[in-house]
Amino acid sequence: MSAGGGTSAAGERRSEAVARRAAPVFDAARAREDFPILRQRVHGRPLVYLDNAATTQKPRSVIDAISRYYEEDNANVHRGVHLLSERATRRHDEARKRVARFIGAADPREVIFVRGTTEAVNLVAQTFGRTRVGAGDEVLVTELEHHSNIVPWQMLCQEKGARLRVVPVTDAGDLDLDALEALLGPRTRLLAVTQVSNALGTVNPLREIIARAKAKGVPVLVDGAQGAPHLAFDADASGADFYAFSGHKLYGPTGIGVLWGRREHLEAMPPWQGGGDMILSVTFEKTIYNALPYKFEAGTPDIAGAIGLAAAIEYVEGLGLEAIAAHERELLGLTVDALSAEDGVRLVGTPRERAGVVSFLVGDVHPHDIGTVLDRHGVAVRAGHHCAQPLMQRLGLAATARASFGLYNTREDVEALVRGIRAVREMFA
């Protein structure tokens, strides 16, 4: 022990070395066995699923959790005094707590269940945004954004007579932070920024971005749809005001997502939809709204979806998000190196930090043709503008082919992708 009662620097280094040696190696091949859909063959070849940015496959534990709810506990929540309703309510409430822990939110009441990231952004735009944005004000987005983090703000600005302003990206695909600083002005009412680009894989430096916005008193919404499956997020420590993500990109079911917001904002925001469970009492003269989080959860919730999402988070946490991220970074590096060495292949975007995604072109071959040929070789990728048309326009492109990775992908998947691309080149030579 040191004189101050702490561990010496040498001791800390030894402890870190021991921890590194003791850390288990991530076994993607073993994890792959947990996903029933990956056992099938496509066009006579083993399925190589590289479309994870669109949606991820589901492990058996998630499928079983959803089935078990419908087989054993199916009842509405918060409304029944019978045993099935009590069990369903308990599992739904536990799911909210599990999500809160996953994103570092101390208060589960700040976790709102929605259908997905798109609905979460729209909810903020139509409540927080409508009460904050007026004529002549500005909402700031970036050129990296998915349409779901552009269109709701466009609609709001058109309604209010406000202006949508855009933070540009560099040719490499990184945000121009000097331009961000210049655009943060006295009329900026909100900054909406993605954690990870779904088209290029760019990892935005959220800590710095949020700090710059907060220095100007600007609230920040973070689109975590592509970030949550790959990167940790600490809501309470982040400085952000809102964080949104979708369950189906995190190995959970479709139709369920999360909006986290700071309690002071959620308390001040008006409800977005009216109906059951978001009220305390109703007369024809007046409605008294329910407390958080129910104020924003009108109607019967996606109970099975929330339970499935909790099971997905439990699965990911069981494997270790850091171990998964390290495995995916290795695959990304292998893919970038392999594609860079292929004649006629062009990588689209070379950001400083990348997660999950590699976009590319093969000569003059249309991305849809690339995707079709790869599919015949059992390799599933995405081809198109990836719901990021403004970014494609900035890059002078109509579309790209996109390979995106998940925890069950392997080196063999990368090799299959490269073989498929060579087949594309041969076919269109």
Image (cartoon, rainbow, N blue to C red):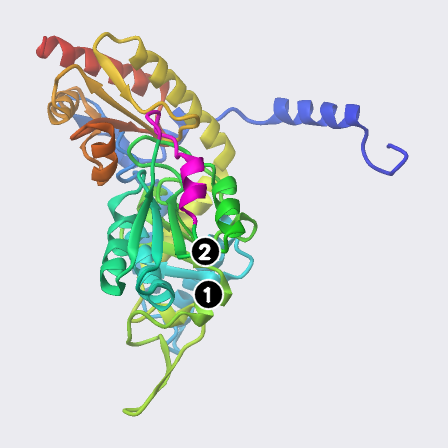
Q: Is 126 drawn above or below residue 372 in the view shown? A: below
Classify mark 1: residues with Cα within 10 Å, few (<14), some (14-19) or many (20+).
Answer: some
Q: Is 230 drawn above or below residue 304 in the view shown? A: above
Residue 233's spot in the image, x, y percent?
49, 44
Classify mark 2: residues with Cα within 10 Å, few (<14), some (14-19) or many (20+).
Answer: some
Question: Of circles 2 and 1, which is in front?
Answer: 2
Q: In the rendered structure, are the residues bearing label 2 and label 1 in contact, judged by CB atoms less than 8 Å apart?
A: yes
What residue is shown with label 2?
219
Let me know if residue 127 is in the magenta part: no
Q: Name which residue type carries label 2.
A: Pro
Along the line of sight, the residue nearer the viewer: 27 or 137: 137
Along the line of sight, the residue nearer the viewer: 265 or 274: 265
Mark 2 or 1, nearer chain start: 2
What residue is shown with label 1?
265
Q: Which residues are magenta?
A: 170-184
Along the line of sight, the residue nearer the viewer: 204 or 325: 204
- Describe the element under mark 1 as helix, strand or loop: helix
Q: Residue at x 29, y 51 (%)?
A: 164
Mark 2 and mark 1: span between their CA atoms?
10 Å
Dividing the image into 4 quarters, which one contains the C terminus? top left
